[in-house]
Amino acid sequence: MKQRTYYSMMLILLMLAVVLMSGCSSAGAISQEITINLGDEPYTIDPQLVFDVTSMRVVNAIFEGLVRKDKNGQPMEGVAGSWEISDDKLTYTFNLRSDAKWWDGTKVTSNHFKEAWLRAIDPQPENHEPSYMGYLLFYIEGAEEYAYGEGNKEDVAIIAKDEETLLVTLKNPTPYFLDLVSNSVFMPVNTEFYNNQPVENGVTTYGAFAETIMGNGPFKITSWNTSQNITLEKNRSYWNSNNIQLEKVNFKMINDNIAAFTAFKAGEIDVVDITQVMQKDELKKSNYYVGSYDAGVTQYISMNNEDPVLKNTNIRKALAYSLDRKTLIQKIVGNKSQEALGFVSPVVKVEGVTFRDRAGKMFSDNDVDTAKDLLERGLNELGLSSLPKLSLLLDDKETSKRDAQAFQEMWRKNLGVEVELLVMPFDVMADRMMQKNYQLSLLMWSGDFNDPLAYLDIFNSYNFFNVAFYSNDKVDNLLEISIYEKDEVKRIDMLIEAEKIVMDEMPICPVYFLWLDYAVNPRVQNLIRGNSPIQDIDLYWTYIQ
Amino acid sequence: MFLTARSAVDKIKESKLAVTCAFFLAAVILLSIFVPLLSTNNYYSQDLNNTFQPPLTKGNLFGTDEFGRDQFVRVWQGARISLTIGVVAALIQMIIGSIYGGLSGILGGLADEILMRIVDVIHSIPNLIIVILITMVMGSSPFTVILALSITEWTGMSRVVRGQTLMLREMEFVQAAKVLGAKKTRIILRHIIPNCFGPIMVNLMFSIPGAIFAESFLSFLGLGINIPKASLGTLASEGYRFISYYPWLIMIPVLIITLTMISFNVLGDTIKEV
Amino acid sequence: MVCFIIKRLAFSLITIWAVVTITFVLLQFLPGDPFTNDKIVHPQILENLKEKYRLDAPWHERYTTYLKGLIKGDLGISMVYRNRSVTSIIKRTFPISLNLGIRAFIIAVFVGLLLGLLSALYKNKTIDHFTLTISMIGVAVPGFIIGTLFQYFICYKLSGIIQEFTGTTFRLFPITGWEGFRHTIVPSVSLAFGALGMIARMMRESMINTLSQRYIVSAKSKGLKQSEIVLKHALKNAILPVISLLGPLFTSIILGSFVIENIFSIPGMGQHFVTSIKTGDYTMVLGLSIFTSFVVVMINTFTDILYTFVDPRVRL
């Protein structure tokens, strides 16, 4: 009896030892798996319907367009292996790769692109919302008319010449068209798959669940647990899958920044956005890599140029000159954001020339004395003895509330101007601005493509997003004829002139060019962030060390 | 026994705890009135070179926040706002509730039944949700918060007053007034309500912390009053973001909310025993 | 008895109708156009959307459509997540909130009853003072404060100390999330705290009351053991007032969960509610409000009916 117990005990101990040791030896294999915090839940992962950065992070990983961005944000071959541009710069011919495949192994054809693009400008979509980003297709001939219900589908100049050739004709020469085409809204749709997806409550479920989407990108989606996580795994059918190193991607949805940061410190996530200076300082003490990138976003205060007080240029300039952007960035924002003394983001580079460098400063920061003078002049012109209380609309974001309180105090201290802060959900704010029912509002503008026009277009009096209701014929003219200028440098100079005129009249007050900080687990290599304003995480080259 | 002011005070004097609470509340009220009034700093002045100072640094007893604003003034300004909203809302609840309850009790019969059924329905509705909805729709100013709180929470008071009214109705002095031909309103105002003083007071002592709680709840969710004005709840919500770096920003407002609510509860309990 | 139940159910239906109508009225006063979002929208798109949602019908038509939809279980479509209905969101998030709520409820009831019982039996001893303090804190301190403090001191500080002590990255009490049993502990306790306080207090009072009753005293004099008296006779009667509290208690737990879920990043209905308020997703807020009110009213009705079964004095 005793002997048997003894032997069985030894056997058990031996087994335990083996188990334990086998557990310890797993140090050899490194799993190519990364966990990233998405933040909020994506609205949808339907490429034609996404409009927010969060959703685009996922779309960018599971879909690929004709063109994609390289590490420096320049267009590079995607599904299109090559392309030709006609001499008059109006017709683009895209040659698709023959080995471009969907997740299920079927071929990606030019028709898939055509159908997707037409979906995006469908004026009366049957079972989904109209596409918000559809306006990016308006550069294509016939697109805008079709979208407004004034033209025919057949007149939209997109031709699927054959399975591997797509022809597009533009309205006007558009130097940044290739950049544009890398946008999510231009990504393909597998029409057979799309038509097979169930429709609930009159809305198609395409893009709403992991099972109801099919992409052609480097990764495929394996699960989507609402409010919790989305998991992706490497797509073996992808034409370049040999060069994709990550095997698995976990997107978590922790929308509280502080909780996300703690999860990062605990090793639960590998990539996190940093929102407080204290977080950065804390990480610097450990071994984490803290990165920074220019988000291509200009924060600005829009002013209603038709308001009885704000119609006066000197008053607007006074408000703009009296802000101390440097201190705001140093003490409040606490990262590499730059004072915006012009509107076009420093991220815009055309043929090696950075617009912002060439254009320079358009006015001075914290120019309180000049501001006071301008205020007085403005008041005289308006026949007022003092400025009535103004109101600033802002949305509910922490950063907006934070910055707005700083502005409020700066205007009070430097100019003696009282401004009331009105916080509201963005929809409500947008509505009021559209109806001209506001004075000041705090907004962020990100360029949809890498060109000065992506920013300056909002000063065109016909532009839908011109919520300052600013109108200057010279500016309109410069913006419109610049696209015909074949010399890129000359074109940039024309646009610089346009910006100068705008800044001289200050219809809006630029505040800062936003940079964002993030922290990465040191094992993660080649994580590219910010190579495009709206696709801010690129996992194409990432691997785990 | 009917509660009078004197008997309430006597009862409070009996308990050390109650006395401490009373003094604490008095201190909070005085500080919230005078500190914002008399202080050299104000609640909105920023000093961006003086941010995140810990408490007890020169010139800033409670430290400073991310804009360098003096927390001492901000906290007592916040207390002023929280107390004002709490007390005003509670008082309006008291008025609405007393009149409604008194009326219901006096009318009696079917009218009483119907009125009380309505109260039951309103009482069953989760009030905080309605408050949230109203603030969402009407915007978040002290006015809308007070309005939302008053509309939804008066039911408790009305039941209490109705109960008292039914009891008092049968009493001699009321019968006498009726016989003498006094109008119903006069009976309510002159005889019933003054004798309800006790239960009304007790209920009030509990409504105030209830209103303060509701307001802090709203502020914490981000539905509170407009920045840069801040109630204690808003301060707690703002401070929460820095809880692991600068804990005083949330701890001090939280402490004051807690102690204030506890004090009201203790006083209410004490008076109840009369 | 049956009469009472029917009356009570009818009453709850009226209450729900009242909530529905109030929310409909509020829906009419919402600021802003429900169809803009983070990007400002083209007018053509706006027109298309408006047509689709039929916002141009007169109010009584909209009211009837609204009511009809509700009866069918259609609570509307989220204005923000436009391919998701409110009902589908509820289906996904309510189980989590329910899970949290039930855990909190169980903790509150068991611990509350136990504390109340003990403090009644050992009146004025340490346990009594302890219970009174806890109940005072639970009743007076807003739930979000308790949650925040627990998260800071227990999840962050305490677990941090344990981490340093054991030299691992193992976090005993995770700060956020809802992925395992350990994740549920601190949130449930935080949520239970307020209700716990009330139950303990009520139980204590009720127990003290019951123990001083004649029949208990006579049982004692007859020589019955203390434990037998307490467990067999006193407990049954002392619990009754506590049962009447259960309805409101559950309500307070549900409301408390809004904030607790927010603080601990728990993907439940409450967190969705708060996020929807912040993003101005009005249809979602209203839909969730109706659902929450419905749950609250049902639970209150249920506990009321339960109370009549349990309390022999109320038996008709």
Image (cartoon, coloured by chain):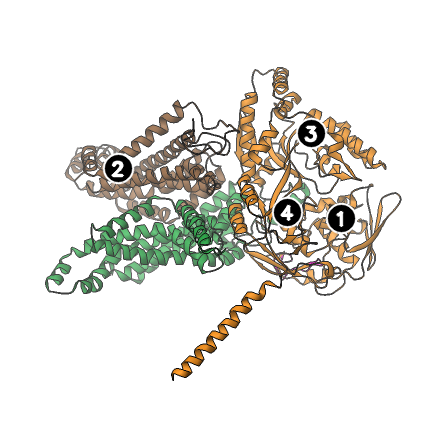
Tell me the element at label 4: helix
| Residue at (26, 37) in percent of width and height | B201
Query: As displayed, is residue B2 above or below residue A508?
Result: below
Q: Earlier in the sequence, mark 3 or mark 4?
A: 4
Comparing marks 3 and 1, which lies closer to the viewer? 1
Chain that appears green: C
Q: x%, y% of residue A46?
A: 66, 54
Name the residue beneath numbered marker 3: A470
Quadrant where the image shows the N terminus of chain A: bottom left
| Residue at (67, 41) in percent of width and height | C42
What chain does mark 2 sit on?
B
Name the residue beneath numbered marker 1: A181
Tell me the element at label 2: helix
Q: Mark on residue C114? A: none
- Per the image, is A205 magenta? yes
Q: Are marks 3 and 1 in contact (CB under 8 Å)?
A: no
Q: Earlier in the sequence, mark 3 or mark 1?
A: 1
Q: Colour of chain B?
A: brown
Name the residue beneath numbered marker 2: B201
Q: Callout 2, which amino acid?
A: Met
Quadrant where the image shows the C terminus of chain A: bottom right
